[in-house]
Image (cartoon, coloured by chain):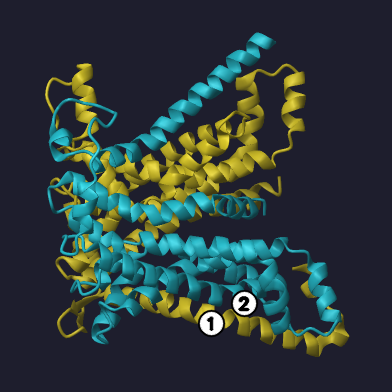
Amino acid sequence: MKKNLILKNFFIYFSALIVFLIMFFPLYGLILTSIQPESIIRSRNLSFFPTEIIFTHFAEVLKPNHISNIYEGIKNSLIVSFLTSFLCIILAFPAAYSLARLNLPAKNIILGTLISIYFLPTILFVIPLFVILVSYQLDDTILSLVVPYTAFTLPFVIWILKSFIDKLPVEVEEAAKIDGCSTLQLLIHIIFPLLRPGLIAAFIFAFILSWVEFLTPLIFTNNLKISTVALGLFRSTIDIKIGQQAAAAIITLIPVTILMIFFQQYITKVVLSGSDK
Amino acid sequence: MTDLLNQPSNSQFKFSREKILAFTLILPSLILVFITYLYPAIFTFVISFAEYDIIRLKIKKFIQFKNFEFLISNYFFTSSVLRTIYFGFLICVCTTILSFLIALLLNEKFIGKAFLRVMIVLPWAVPSVVSGVLWGQMFHADTGFLNALLYQLGVISGYKIWLADPLVALHVIAIAEIWKAIPFMTLFFLSGLQSLPSEVFEAASVDGANVFQRFSNILFPLMLPIAIPLFLIQFVLAMKSFDTIFVLTRGGPGGGTTTLNYFIYQEAFETFNLGRASAAAYVLLIITLAVVLIPTISRFLIKFFWGNK
């Protein structure tokens, strides 16, 4: 029995190591490339440990006239992602409450439609939106990114918030209603603070999805007046300097990674709360 | 749903007021979704039967099914449809199996589990452009780790240009997509595993079932209801993949990595043939819907013909 346990443990740690290597090695490779001189990257002496660490690639990328235009990208991506997440929460919070708690007719159909829309091919909607934006000369604006992002993310955010509201105890709301609390007051003063973990999770979801979006900005900013991080990074791939490319990729990655590590617990909670229903 | 029917009749007025309130709360979201989804979907449907003038932004003329006819007779299109379906299934099958195994691992107790979980979730947050760059570098002909590793191990005699071979390039893209898709599915499988009652396993191991029996007789049937929707969702997401293809191969070499989604992009925004692109977009939609609906419909039919068992 004991021998069995040791064998089992060995197997677990061994597979944990394999999984770690598979999932993390690509990222490690990227980090390695970003801190090594171009001559070492291009040499054929394979080394999985840095022999000479330099930060010139980052310095090059962060220069204002670099091809990826990283400052502009980060600024725009921050604005767009914040606006999108904010709008999503404002729109989704009442909608999720309505779906979770109120006597909305056909609510299952509405929720089902919203969720299935999220999985439809984006390109189907992008073509006409492009035509509309161009005909009103709204392409290449922050607005042309925020509105589609919000719409693309909204169904998902509504679903997240609804599953969080479903988990709140109904008694609190009933007590508040007996005390003469109107629905609006209830929403603002009682549900909103109780829902904080859900709101944070939803905000992060929307933020990450907007930060990583590529197809929409690629098409809607066709005159390259505004750039996002993802677009900037793509533009740097035209250049052959591999080290700088890796550095730009890491700079793009950092904000979402920090969000992910800090709020991993919330994200796990979303998944856990969603699946048991 | 049942409380809707059990509403006491004297609260009829209150009930309708609540209905109005419920609608007002959800209306802004519905309007936004309507404008950005339904209207474009109709628009795309209409111009899929037309020739669209990209300069004047007007429909030039309606040509009935010409767009569809052109597509079906176009070898490039039909091959990209088949390629897309293969690509989708490849990603689904690999992601489902790997994620399930990783979830089984994370369901065990061991030191460093929390750390490993963060590491597994991480690729999900990696923007697909970054993952394109990352895998592009991994498989790079001159500087890639793969070439260097295989060369030093003596597997290959010279450096290979991986992305120059259409079939290899397609699988490189699939690897990138699988790597990115694993985190999300693993979390769902993990939550499914954690929601299973532990008594089931205890009873089974007391009965002397070995690992494989436990897997095939208990775990597999219990996890199937979670695995099927995840599989379908993954298929739909694989149908949508664009960024990795765009960054890694741009649909090449020789159209070898052009999936249907990428084909539509090229038709719409490189050759600006919006009518044809819209028709192709509807073909993609139909494939997506078919894959999602077939299990639902077959389940309905089974229920209908063989009763509720």
> Is the C-beta separation of discs 2 and 1 under 8 Å?
yes
Residue marked by disc 1: B28
Which secondary structure, mark 2? helix
Residue A276 locus on image (x, y percent): 67, 51
Task: State the residue in front, A205 or A46.
Answer: A46
Q: Which residue does the image show at 53% across and 78% down from the upper left?
A: B29
On the rendered structure, is B65 left or right of A212?
left
Residue B44 at x, y percent in the picture: 32, 74
Based on the displayed image, in which of its 4 quarters is residue A226 positioned? bottom left
Q: Nearer the viewer, residue A71 or A275?
A: A71
Decide: is B175 above or below A183.
above
Q: Which residue is mark 2?
A: A94
Inter-mark Cα distance, 2 to 1: 9 Å
Q: Which chain is home to disc 2? A: A
The three-letter code of the residue at mark 1 reads: Pro
Specify the chain shown as cyan: A
Local crowd size for mark 1, using a 10 Å CA cut-off: few (<14), some (14–19), many (≥20) = some
Amino acid, disc 2 = Pro
Question: Compared with residue B102, is residue A236 higher up or lower down, i.e. above or below?
Answer: below
Residue that appears at 29% across and 37% down? A29
Task: From this view, report whether residue B31 is shown above or below residue B160.
Answer: below
